[in-house]
Image: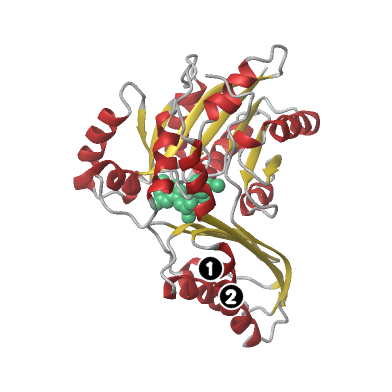
Amino acid sequence: MTRLHLVNGFLGSGKTTAIIEAARRHVLRGERVGVVTNDQGRYLVDTAFVSAQDIPVVQVTGGCFCCSYDQLLEVLTALHEDAQPQVIYAESVGSCADLIATVVRPLQGTPGRAVRCQSLSVFADSRLLLHLLRGDTLPLGDDVLYIIERQLAEAGLVVLNKWDLLHPQHRKELLSLAADAFAGVPLLPQNSLLPEEIARWMEAIEGEEPALPSAAVWVDYARYGRGETQLAWIDRALLARLPDQGRSEVVRLLQAISEALEAHQVPVAHVKWHLSSETGTSKLSWTTLSQPDWASAVPAVSGTTQLLLNARIQADSAQAGAWIDEALARALAASQAGWRIVAQETFAPSPPQRPARALP
Ligand SMILES: Nc1nc2c(ncn2[C@@H]2O[C@H](COP(=O)(O)OP(=O)(O)O)[C@@H](O)[C@H]2O)c(=O)[nH]1
Ligand SMILES: [Mg+2]
């Protein structure tokens, strides 16, 4: 029986980072592992990045797990046929909620399935969670924050991720607020960049006792839908042949998009880039509370280079798409590299509908 670990948590909270390290550790132990990624669009940075690590990966696109159960079952079957994984990590869209009712309970209610759902970890950026539990003002709208709150309400394990980025003076306060807010649910402070901390997470979810609540939580789908649609999806895939000093080209491009979003004060949930060239692949992220300095984050690149942008931002999708395209057009016009835009999507995701199969 394949063990399935569901991993939820807001956009940019650290799910993919943790899953990739966990998958590596399974492989080192001689276990076969697979990953399911999920997002609103079709060209997914996470799929590209997981696949670049030689980890078998399938994706559920065009909506979150809660609305795409049939597609989830299809890709789980395909993963089974291709890789026979003993353990699967399935990461839902970071704006998805209601997984117990829409995925876990229906899976449990289907006898004979080759997959057993073992855990539901919900990741949170510890800094964001502290603000949320204190009731501080955040750049994200109330309905978006409602999604985060509902995600956490159904956790079997709350991962207080990016613990390293939370000021040591605030750690006790977060532990105490979280213990009150998620009474009885295990809390795991974690720095997902440290392999030994991922090993601890794996122990927590791979133990005898499933880290999985037995009952679903109530979700107000009107609010959930408003939060989901407020977060525009914008992706752009670009291709060029770069010289050996191509790095500065990429830095300028990434900076141009960031400056456009900043100029219009667009709240960011997660803006991520997958960069692949003949020198290697990497993933670069800008999350709600951390914008990296692209000039130091971008690695060396050369030769045929692909850039894939997935942006989930709180804005009108058409308006924000136009801002991004203007910035891109200016950056590409100033470049000699002959960049081509090879794929693009811009939309406001549809509001999720509570499926009829949802179980309490
Ligand atoms: N400092 C720190 N950064 C982290 C941690 N976990 C993830 N990150 C970074 O947070 C960003 C978003 O991570 P990602 O795994 O893509 O988040 P996801 O959207 O939840 O899958 C990336 O830049 C990661 O390197 C952590 O525990 N500490
Ligand atoms: Mg991810």
Residue 355 vs residue 301, the one in the foreground: 355
**Residue drawn at point x = 64 percent, y = 14 percent:** 109
Q: Secondary structure at mark 2?
A: helix
Amino acid type of disc 1? Val
Percent x, y of residue 237: 68, 65
Q: Are marks 2 and 1 in contact (CB under 8 Å)?
A: yes
Q: Nearer the viewer, residue 279 or 297?
A: 297
Left or right side of 150 for 281: right
Which picture quadrant has residue 130?
A: top left
Depth check: give the residue in front, 83 or 219.
219
Residue 234 on image: x %, y %:
60, 61
Q: Residue furthest front?
A: 222
Secondary structure found at label 1: loop
Please, is residue 232 above or below residue 206 in the view? below
Task: Name the kind of residue labelled 2 in the image.
Answer: Arg
Q: Residue at x 64, y 44 (%)?
A: 63
- Looking at the rendering, which quadrant does residue 268 occupy? bottom left
Residue bearing mark 2: 247
What numbered label is drawn on residue 298?
A: 1
Few, some or many residues within 10 Å of mark 1 (<14, 14–19, 20+)? some
Q: Position of residue 196 (x, y in %)?
A: 44, 37
Mark 2 or mark 1, earlier in chain = 2
The answer, for residue 78, to whether it is visible in the render is yes
Is residue 299 among the parts visible in the rendering? no
